[in-house]
Image (tube, rainbow, N blue to C red):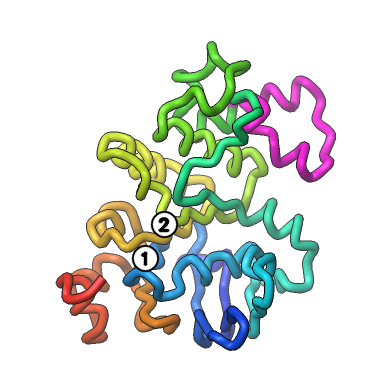
């Protein structure tokens, strides 16, 4: 049986009076790729933003219920520590434009006021870029700006930046939606490699992508968790009619 790294209990998220995520109870298995799938506007991004306490940064937002990271209540933890342990990569590549590739990778340490020796910085940069399958492409250009890279490389740089903090969980919010097919394939291959060392939670409405890369899939509809199971089972024998209709392209 897989061990659980992150779990929610009766989690609801609000924007003002609007409940965007409704009473979700979910266990995320460790060192697997879990996809959160569903049509646009169903609460996928809001849900994962509760996993690293980014939802509360939005004015007039609130959360009810619990989120546990290795059985620690994240809402009883310092949010900066939560965000170090639960990294996030966004839809559009967002390297810091004024920073070099090198400084982008270790930006989390600087933003958190954490001191690194030069040797530690060098090691973290090389290891993180290696894990993101980018080291060989950029090792001779570390002092150039991150924006010098292609879109796919920039997204891998953002993955390296998140990995540099040695997180337990990496949240990927539609990480290939702004990329071309070749760059998308590169990121998908990378996800399969990364799950050896880190738990991945992927938000996508791309059904084919979910089928290719994920071990488990959660189907979210109108803020509710409709069903959760192994990707193979959910894609071939969904238990709920809404899941089946989504997978057949009836809505999306």
Please indicate whether residue 82 sits to the left or right of residue 138 in the image.
Answer: right
**Left or right, residue 106 beside residue 244:** right
Q: Does residue 24 show up magenta in the picture?
A: no
Pointer 2: residues within 10 angstroms few (<14), some, or many (20+)?
A: many
Residue 24 in sight from this viewpoint: no
Q: Which residues are magenta?
A: 102-126
**Which of marks 2 and 1 precedes in the sequence?**
2
What residue appears at the point 68 percent right and 71 percent down from the top-left corner? 59
Q: Quadrant of the C terminus?
A: bottom left
Against 216, residue 19 (above or below) is below
Indicate the secondary structure of the residue bearing disc 1. Answer: strand
Q: Is residue 104 visible?
A: yes
Quadrant for the N terminus, please.
Answer: bottom left
How far apart in space, not on screen, are marks 1 and 2 (Cα)? 7 Å
Of residues 190 and 98, the one drawn nearer to the viewer in this rendering: 98
Residue 193 drawn at (x, y percent)? 41, 41
Give residue 156's position: percent from left, percent from top: 47, 36
Secondary structure beneath dot 2 equals: strand
Q: Is residue 116 magenta?
A: yes
Labelled pair 1, 2 in contact (Cβ < 8 Å): yes
Viewer-nearest residue: 138 or 189: 138
Residue 4, position as x, y percentages in the image: 54, 68
Q: Residue at x 45, y 69 (%)?
A: 44
Checking the image for residue 33, the label placed there is 2
Image quadrant in which you'd find residue 14: bottom right
Q: Main secondary structure of the magenta part?
A: helix
Can you identify the residue that label 1 sits on?
A: 216
Q: In this image, 65 relative to 235: left or right?
A: right
Percent position of residue 86, x then y: 62, 56
């Amino acid at each position: 049986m897989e061990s659980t790294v992150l779990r929610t209990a009766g989690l609801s998220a609000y924007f003002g009076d609007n409940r965007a995520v409704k009473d979700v109870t979910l266990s995320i298995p460790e060192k697997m790729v879990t996809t959160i799938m569903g049509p646009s506007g169903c609460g996928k991004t809001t849900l994962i933003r509760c996993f690293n306490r980014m939802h509360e940064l939005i004015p007039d937002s609130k959360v009810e219920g619990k989120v546990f990271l290795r059985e620690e209540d994240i809402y009883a933890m310092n949010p900066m520590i939560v965000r170090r342990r639960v990294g996030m990569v966004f839809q559009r590549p967002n390297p810091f434009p004024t920073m070099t590739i090198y400084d982008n990778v270790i930006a989390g340490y600087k933003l958190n006021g954490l001191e690194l020796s030069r040797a530690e910085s060098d090691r973290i940069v090389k290891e993180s870029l290696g894990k993101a399958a980018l080291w060989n492409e950029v090792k001779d250009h570390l002092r150039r700006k991150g924006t010098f890279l292609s879109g796919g490389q920039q997204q891998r740089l953002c993955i390296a930046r998140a990995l540099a903090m040695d997180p337990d969980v990496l949240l990927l919010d539609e990480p290939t939606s702004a990329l071309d097919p070749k760059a998308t394939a590169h990121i998908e291959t990378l996800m399969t490699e990364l799950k050896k060392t880190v738990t991945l939670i992927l938000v996508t409405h791309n059904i084919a992508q979910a089928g290719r890369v994920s071990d488990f899939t959660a189907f979210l509809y109108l803020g509710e968790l409709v069903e959760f199971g192994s990707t193979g089972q959910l894609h071939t024998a969904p238990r709920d009619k809404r899941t089946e209709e989504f997978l057949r392209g009836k809505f999306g």
